Image (cartoon, rainbow, N blue to C red):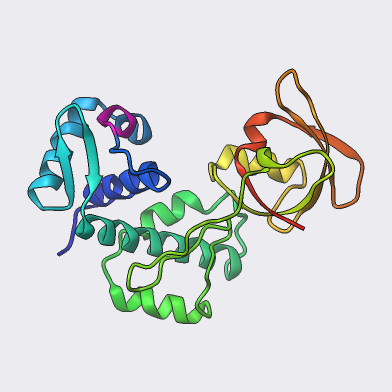
Amino acid sequence: MAHTQSEENYLKAIYSLSVDTDTPVSTNALAERLQTQASSVTDMVKKLADKKLVAYQKYQGVQLTEGGLHSALKVIRKHRLWETFLVEKLHFGWDEVHDMAEQLEHVQAPELTERLNSFLDFPAHDPHGDPIPDANGHIEPRKAPTLDHLKPGETAVVVGVLDSSTDFLKYLNAESIGLGTHLEVLEIISFDRSMRLRLDGGQGQTVSAAVTKNLFVKRV
């Protein structure tokens, strides 16, 4: 069953807000994520519930049904494949592709999606390190910790970002931090939990706690 662009955006947002928890997503959280009014969210959630895409109880929040989860992952699959195409084949920066992929993800052409996947040689992750769901809706769980879980003296490689906003990615570019960057934790500042890091064997530099919470790393 085809869904409207707005319905797909809601399903994707519910998935993003619930991926690491079993707790229902509140309408206020959805309104904040989608930058809309809570009353509009309630109206859409009721429509999605009528289509059996979500389970919704007033004051208790909303959860994806099996069908809703499958639909959300189809949209996410297209989004991440298009981001991969835009970076790898058209050479856009990883901070430039989100908005373009937001438009392309709504194209209703399953054959196009599968040909794109084949053309890209079946990528497992997008340019931000996020796993790409397969055609059956299976998605590899992310096991990497965020940087704020490391201790002084530990070393790691950056493997993904939790925040893929343009502003954050531009910040990382300016600080020469990207996927594959090798880092060593030199010090954790007790005052604000910021970190002093050595990046790729260079000079030490400090990043805020907000940054350390949004970088996925693999210990090495």
Compared with 60, 151 (above or below) is below
Q: Give how far across and how far down residue 184 sits, in percent.
A: 83, 46
- The residue segment tinted magenta is 26-30
Compared with 218, 49 (above or below) is above
Q: Nearer the viewer, residue 139 or 151?
A: 151
Which quadrant of the structure image shows residue 110? bottom left
At 30% from the left and 56% from the top, the residue drawn is: 72
At 56% from the left and 56% from the top, the residue drawn is: 143
Q: Give how far across and how far down residue 74 sits, in percent.
A: 32, 63
Q: Nearer the viewer, residue 118 or 55?
A: 55
At 38% from the left and 58% from the top, the residue drawn is: 76
Q: Nearer the viewer, residue 32 or 14?
A: 14
Residue 10 belongs to the span the image colors magenta: no
Q: Give how far across and how far down residue 116 sits, in percent.
A: 43, 76
Q: Main secondary structure of the magenta part?
A: helix
Name the residue furthest top: 191
Quadrant including the C terminus: bottom right
Which quadrant of the structure image shows residue 166? top right
In the rendered structure, the answer to whether residue 103 lies left or right of residue 200 reads: left
Which quadrant of the structure image shows residue 21? top left
